[in-house]
Amino acid sequence: MLKMYRVIPPNEVRRVLIVSYFRSGSTFLGDILQTPLKTFYHFEPYHITGATRLRFGDISEGECARLFGHLMRCEFDQLPEYMAWVSQNNNQFLVRHNQFLWRHCTLKNNICFNATYMQGMCQRSPLQVAKFVRVPLRYALNFVREDPEFAKSTAIVHLIRDPRAVLASRRHLDWCQDECARADALCSQMSEDVETFEELQKSHPKVTMVQIKLEELATDPFNQTRRLFQQLGLLYEMSTEAFLKTHTQHGSTDPYSTRRNSAAVAYDWQQRLSLKETLDIQHICGPLLLRAGYDKVEMKRQRHPPVENHTDQATASNEIRMH
């Protein structure tokens, strides 16, 4: 199977890193970005840490950078711990998300988790995509800029989503408890990354960095994807168009499926959160909502004109508005 494809010289390989958050639409974006033919997809490589948000007090930055470097160079033979991790039954989904690899390896006798085979497929991919929801944006850039080879060939996409939508989506997940379910933790992480993005665009103009909102991608997927691909220097081909047609107009209720009515999903938090829950999140996340350009829900006291045959005195009622 490997003989079907030529090995791509390292200086011809493009790399795209997605930095985002749990339940932010990052799997959807990752699947879009792996639609170009022969794309090798590193799905959540820091899943091995067991953390929901990576802090380098729990695991050293050197260890994380080492894993990143070996993955980007397709050096799976240097990662026995990682290969053992993704081979475990409960973790094999990390490899199944890599469609280019999975389509080919399942034709053989279960070589999907063979480091030599995985390395060979990776070396034949002109595009590598990696998705991170555990890594702060600043650390992702550190991984890239430490190696001149990566700095010239790597783009970073910062995907953000309305924190009210993220928290509404997380609330029914058994594994997302404690810090993962807290508005203050999420909005602190997002605020740090939004601020970092603005700083790094100015201080590192040679590194391609793109910020995109899930809401924009979900409500106008075809135009926004074309625009994103242009920014990343990727070709928008029929494989991408076909994916969007089959994954943006479905009504699946599976929380892990990417086949959804994308426009409806983007704003379904307005039905899933109570007014009190919404206002509580807004109280905590107000500065982030403002900075990221999200409208807030507001309660307004409104005076109504007199009603004929009832009373001459105006009555007051509550009105909910997006503002």
Image: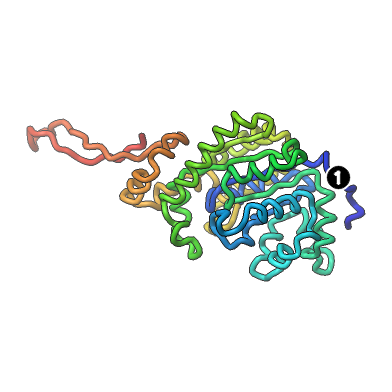
Quick check: 248 left or right of 234? left
Q: In which quarter of the image is the C terminus?
A: top left
Quick check: 1 left or right of 110? right
What x and y, as percent, mark residue 214?
Answer: 54, 42
Query: In this orientation, does residue 241 appear?
Result: no
Coloring scheme used: rainbow
Front position in the image: 73 or 65: 65
The amino acid at mark 1 is Ile
Q: Is residue 106 above or below residue 263?
A: below
Label 1: which secondary element: loop
Quick check: 247 left or right of 66? left
Q: In this view, does 275 lie above or below 292?
A: below
- In the rendered image, the residue lying farthest to the bottom is 89
In which image quadrant can residue 94 be found? bottom right
What x and y, as percent, mark residue 289?
Answer: 42, 38
Q: Mark 1 Cα within 10 Å, few/some/many (few <14, many 20+)?
A: some
In which image quadrant can residue 305 be found? top left
Quick check: 171 left or right of 19? left
Which residue is rendered at x = 66% and y = 54% of the image? 64
Which residue is rendered at x = 44% and y = 61% of the image? 178
Numbered disc total: 1
Residue carrying label 1: 8
Q: In this view, does 317 lie above or below 254?
A: above
- In the rendered image, the residue lying farthest to the right is 3
Which residue is rendered at x = 59% and y = 34% of the image? 200
What x and y, as percent, mark residue 298?
Answer: 31, 39
